[in-house]
Image: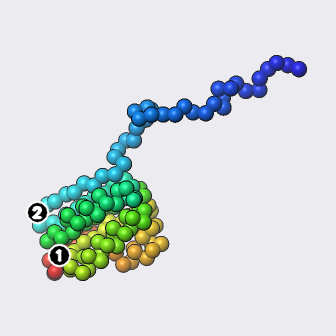
Amino acid sequence: MHNIPLWASSDFAAPLPRGPGDGESPTGPIFDIDVEQRADQPIVARVFGSVDLLTAPALQTCVNDHVGSAAGLVLDLSGVNFLAASGLTVLADTDRRARQDNLAWGLVASTRPVLRPLEVLGLDVSLPTYESVPDAVAAVRAAALTS
């Protein structure tokens, strides 16, 4: 018999655990909301990252703070890469409140991570959904003027 190993032990070694600051870090925030307010325009809240059980309360707070604006609210979810049930609950609750209090609001849903859960639950039809921010702003502005 030959005394030649078939592989070196380092070829199949498990990776070493990594701590904070080791290696690459995310290029951007995991979750963020950028709120833009312009005179005589609906408030535009651009949401980035994952909307899940941990981040949905921040989205709910943002909605609560701005949905009552006289000019209306546009939620831009085009930067969302994951929409969990808790995020869908925020959207459904926002729509219920807007209908009850006659508030103008719109939702920008143009990416698969957002559209797919909305479609599965039929919310793409019942929520005021638009493909772009300009479309949503125009619709919300018109609705705000009539309410």
Quadrant for residue 74, please give it.
Answer: bottom left
In the figure, 44 relative to 105: above or below? above
In the figure, 11 relative to 110: above or below? above
Quadrant for residue 107, please give it.
Answer: bottom left
SS type, badge 2: loop
Residue wearing tag 1? 144
The circle on residue 14 is none
Q: Residue furthest top?
A: 3
The count of marks equals 2
Q: Nearer the viewer, residue 3 or 18?
A: 18
The location of residue 56, given as percent across then percent down, is 34, 60
Q: Amino acid at mark 2?
A: Ala
Mark 2 and mark 1 in contact (Cβ < 8 Å)? no
Estimate how packed mark 2 is, as few (under 14), some (14 to 19) or many (20 or more) residues with alpha carbons within 10 Å: few
The location of residue 11, given as percent across then percent down, is 66, 29
Which colour assignment does the render follow?
A: rainbow
- At a point 22% along the width and 74% down the height, the residue shown is 104
Direction from residue 67 to residue 5 in the image, left or right = right
Q: Nearer the viewer, residue 140 or 26?
A: 26
Q: Amino acid at mark 1?
A: Ala
Whichever of labels 1 and 2 marks the residue nearer the N terminus, that label is: 2
SS type, badge 1: helix
Direction from residue 3 to residue 23 in the image, left or right = left
Residue wearing tag 2? 39
In the figure, 40 relative to 17: above or below? below
Direction from residue 7 to residue 25 in the image, left or right = left
The location of residue 98, given as percent across then percent down, is 25, 76
